[in-house]
Image (cartoon, rainbow, N blue to C red):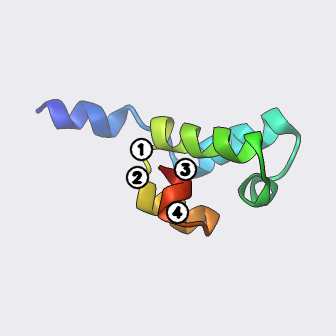
């Protein structure tokens, strides 16, 4: 059951956005609508720690697939 370990290691999307908001002194909506390096960091952290795939990140940030990848 190695896939169970993959499921349990991820944080929720909301938990990640809350922590990013605290780190960058913004609200979660501000993280999503931000531009530049904060947006890039948010996309990377959501991919790595929340387990979101590129399509889910694309929908959350309302951007195109190539921007996410």
Q: CA distance from mark 2 to mark 3?
A: 12 Å
Q: CA distance from mark 4 to mark 3?
A: 14 Å
Say whether marks 4 and 3 touch (CB < 8 Å).
no
- Residue occupied by mark 2: 53
What x and y, as percent, mark residue 67?
56, 56
Within 10 Å of disc 3 (Cα), the crowding (few <14, some 14-19, many 20+) is: some
Within 10 Å of disc 1 (Cα), the crowding (few <14, some 14-19, many 20+) is: some
**Does label 4 or label 1 sit earlier along the sequence?**
1
Say whether marks 2 and 1 touch (CB < 8 Å).
yes
Say whether marks 2 and 3 touch (CB < 8 Å).
no
Q: Which mark is residue 58?
A: 4
Tell me what residue is drawn at x 11 percent, y 33 percent.
1
Q: Which mark is residue 51?
A: 1
**Does label 4 or label 3 sit earlier along the sequence?**
3
Q: Is residue 40 left or right of residue 7?
A: right
Say whether marks 2 and 4 touch (CB < 8 Å).
no
Q: Secondary structure at mark 4?
A: helix
**Does label 1 or label 3 sit earlier along the sequence?**
3
Relative to 51, say whether 5 is above or below: above
Q: CA distance from mark 4 to mark 1?
A: 13 Å
Q: Is residue 14 left or right of residue 53?
A: right
**Does label 2 or label 4 sit earlier along the sequence?**
2
Q: CA distance from mark 2 to mark 4?
A: 9 Å
Mark in the foreground, 2 or 1: 2
- Residue occupied by mark 3: 13
Tell me what residue is drawn at x 88 percent, y 40 percent.
25
Q: How many marks?
A: 4
Mark in the foreground, 2 or 3: 2
- Towards the viewer: 63 or 11: 63
Furthest residue in direction right, as rendered: 25
What x and y, as percent, mark residue 51?
42, 44
Say whether marks 1 and 3 touch (CB < 8 Å).
no
């Amino acid at each position: 059951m190695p896939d169970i370990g993959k499921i349990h290691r991820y944080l929720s999307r909301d938990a990640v956005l809350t922590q990013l908001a605290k780190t960058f002194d913004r609200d979660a909506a501000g993280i999503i609508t931000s531009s530049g390096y904060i947006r890039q960091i948010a996309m990377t952290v959501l991919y790595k720690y929340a387990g979101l795939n590129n399509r889910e990140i694309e929908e959350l940030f309302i951007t195109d697939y190539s921007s996410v990848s």
